[in-house]
Image: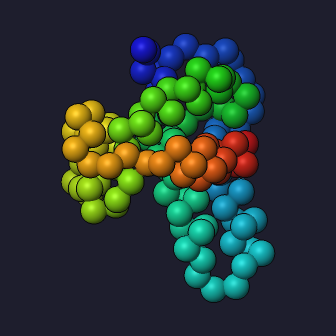
Amino acid sequence: MLDRRSADRPPSTKVLFSAVASEYLAARRASKLGRNNDIETAESRLNLFVELIGDHPVDTYTATDLQAFIEFLKFWPSNAKDRPDHLSARDIVDSNRDLRSKPLARKTLEEGYLAVVKSAC
């Protein structure tokens, strides 16, 4: 599988995913008062997508990008304590390929991680 961060993409004049994600999070924050853990969770999941798949113009992502994200998340530890801060997301995934740490539940993957990426676009 190709590294989706550097995969060839068609030219685009659209904004980067990170800009759209920032606007999406700002809109969610504006509709809430005070600190909201759901928004912070969404932000960390969007940042994970960018770290693993890359920050590209929004109209250049394909189903292959989402599939690659799913492939990474199959090895993403469900418990935050199993994700050391000093490791990159790719290093965390690589260190859990043996599934020594319990991975995400399918529902969390679909309704949490994938849903927020789709919502931000």
Q: Position of residue 21 (x, y in %)?
A: 65, 51
User: Would residue 46 appear left or right of 91 to someone viewing this image?
Assistant: right
Question: Where on the picture, by quarter, is residue 74?
Answer: top left
3 shown above or below 72: above
Regarding residue 106, the answer to whether it shows in the image is yes
User: Would residue 120 appear left or right of 39 to someone viewing this image?
Assistant: right
User: Would residue 77 appear left or right of 45 to someone viewing this image?
Assistant: left
What residue lies at 42% left-to-right and 21% top-to-bottom?
3
Q: Position of residue 17 (x, y in %)?
A: 63, 41
19 shown above or below 25: above
Regarding residue 18, the answer to whether it shows in the image is no
What residue lies at 55% left-to-right and 26% top-to-bottom?
67
Judge by depth and name the residue closer to the eye, 54 or 11.
54
Q: Position of residue 5 (x, y in %)?
A: 47, 27
Q: Position of residue 78 (x, y in %)?
A: 38, 54
Judge by depth and name the residue closer to the eye, 42 or 58.
42
Farthest bottom residue in view: 34
What residue lies at 71% left-to-right and 57% top-to-bottom?
24
What residue lies at 70% left-to-right and 38% top-to-bottom?
15
